[in-house]
Amino acid sequence: MNRERFRRAVALIDQANAGDPEWEVWQERPYPCTYLYGLRMTEWLVKLDDRAPETAFLAARAQHVCRWLVPRDRYPRDRRGYLAWRTFLYRLHAEKTAALLKAAGYDPASIDQVRRILMKRGLKRDPQVQLVEDAACLVFLQYYFVPFARDYADEKIVAIVAKTWRKMSESAQRHALRLPLPERALRLVRQAVGTA
């Protein structure tokens, strides 16, 4: 690994993520939401595999880069609208990250690998894609699941978690079952596991 190049790339990703106008307070400190998400992705990636390839670390840090540029409400509030929004975001994250990595001095092969991870090409087949997806699922369950679940009926939440569960590796599933979730969230996760 070229450490200077890696540090330069992370700084560029963090700088892009720090432009998020939405902020969240975590551990009594305010953070731009997308920047905080990148920190959480990195934290989980290290827990899952602290020897992961450099490209996996970069993809994890950039998983939601510049996401605020395309709010969810620009698309219809149905499943088709959600899928169109998500697909557009995969491309947005991949292209924004590719430009940042090029600026940091990365070679085309490394940039293409990060792009593949962010586009989720090869889930369940490519270990790096799976690793970053596992980190994303665990970040969701640990940090975003409880507030997300408040807005929906139990049945819908169980279906969503079951879909999330099927995308995860067995190792990530074991981590998920050890998360210190509140009673309702834990019950919904256990129900979802039974249906996944």
Image (cartoon, rainbow, N blue to C red):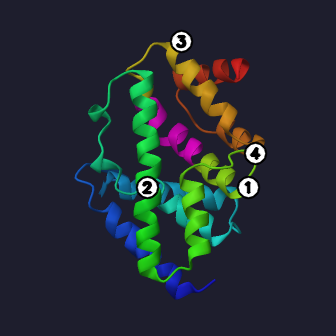
Q: What element carries label 2?
A: helix
Task: Looking at the image, tell me whether mark 1 or mark 3 is earlier in sequence order.
Answer: 1
Which residue is rendered at x = 51% and y = 16% of the image?
156
Question: What is the distance, in whole Å, between disc 2 and disc 1 at their CAs?
Answer: 20 Å
Residue at which label 2 appears:
93
Q: How many numbered discs sit on the rendered protein?
A: 4
Q: Indicate the position of residue 74 as horizontal and vertical percent values.
A: 27, 34
Which of these two is toward me, 111 or 153? 111
**Which residue lies under the disc numbered 3?**
155
Q: Which mark is residue 184?
A: none
Q: Nearer the viewer, mark 1 or mark 4?
A: 1
Is 139 covered by the magenta stretch?
yes
For label 1, the crowd category at 10 Å Cα-Cα, with few meaning under 14, some 14 to 19 and many 20 or more, is: some
Q: Residue 127 bears which disc, if any?
A: 1
x and y, in percent, of residue 188 in the image:
58, 20
Amino acid type for the residue under numbered disc 1: Pro
How far apart are the alpha carbons under marks 1 and 3?
32 Å
Dot 1 or dot 4, earlier in sequence? 1
Residue bearing the label numbered 4: 171
